[in-house]
Image: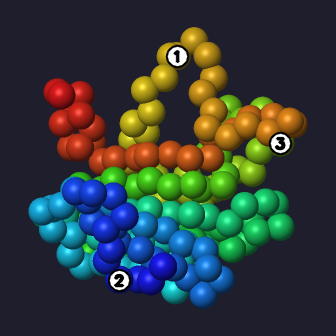
Amino acid sequence: MTNNESSLLYGYETHFNEGVDKRGTAIIVKEGLLLTNIKRLPSGRGIAGLHEDTWLVNIYAPSGSGNRQEREKIFSHDLAYLLRKCQKYILLSGDFNCVLSQSDGMGSPNISKSLASAIHGLALHDVWDSPVHRPHYTHYTNDGATRIERICITAPLKKSKERN
């Protein structure tokens, strides 16, 4: 895999970011949709691209308590690099390998103040449609469950989603 565009799925273009440690992220867009201003983190842990007036961002944060400092740096510094020329439309997605609050997990989940601050600062909204009466998790282990994967969008995109 290289950082060049490639087509793994018929009818779609895949924009890769493979890092020095062979970790990577990608953004897949329907053929014919132009993705410009593509930015890649050298670590491979983040990629962003602009489609018209919407930034698409994908993050793959390091997992585990031992990588907390590296993970926090991605949310507090690297995300700002990816969104340097921020638009009012942002779609931020990824495997964040942490949660925003205790309610996002059972047991002792890795809570990220930097991710919570970034989501709040960018005024992003969670797009997960889940029943209110039960917890919703994306990652399960023998010891518990957490909500480490997310898709967040700005308010104008949320309004558009609600109309459709």
Describe residue 23's horizontal placement relative to residue 129 as left or right. Answer: right
Mark 3 / mark 1, whichever is N-terminal: 3
Describe residue 111's horizontal placement relative to residue 159 as left or right. Answer: right
Mark 2 / mark 3, whichever is N-terminal: 2
Q: Nearer the viewer, residue 157 or 42?
A: 42
What's the amino acid at mark 3?
Ser
In the rendered structure, find residue 108 and report the number of the disc placed on it: 3
In the rendered structure, find residue 27 and report the number of the disc placed on it: none
The residue where tag 1 is placed is: 132
In the rendered structure, find residue 4 and report the number of the disc placed on it: 2
Where does residue 111 sit, x and y in percent of width and height? 70, 50
Identify the secondary structure beneath mark 2.
Answer: loop
| Marks 2/3: CA–CA distance | 39 Å
- Rendered view: 81 above or below 124: below
Mark 2 / mark 1, whichever is N-terminal: 2
Residue located farthest toward the top when viewing the structure as drawn: 133
| Neighbour tally class for label 2: few under 14, some 14-19, many 20 plus, Cα within 10 Å | few
**Disc nearest the viewer among 2 and 3:** 2
For the C terminus, the image quarter is top left
What's the amino acid at mark 1?
Val
Residue located farthest toward the right when viewing the structure as drawn: 143
Identify the secondary structure beneath mark 3.
Answer: loop
Q: Nearer the viewer, residue 28 or 83?
A: 28
Residue 140 shows in this picture: yes
| Neighbour tally class for label 3: few under 14, some 14-19, many 20 plus, Cα within 10 Å | few
What's the amino acid at mark 2?
Asn
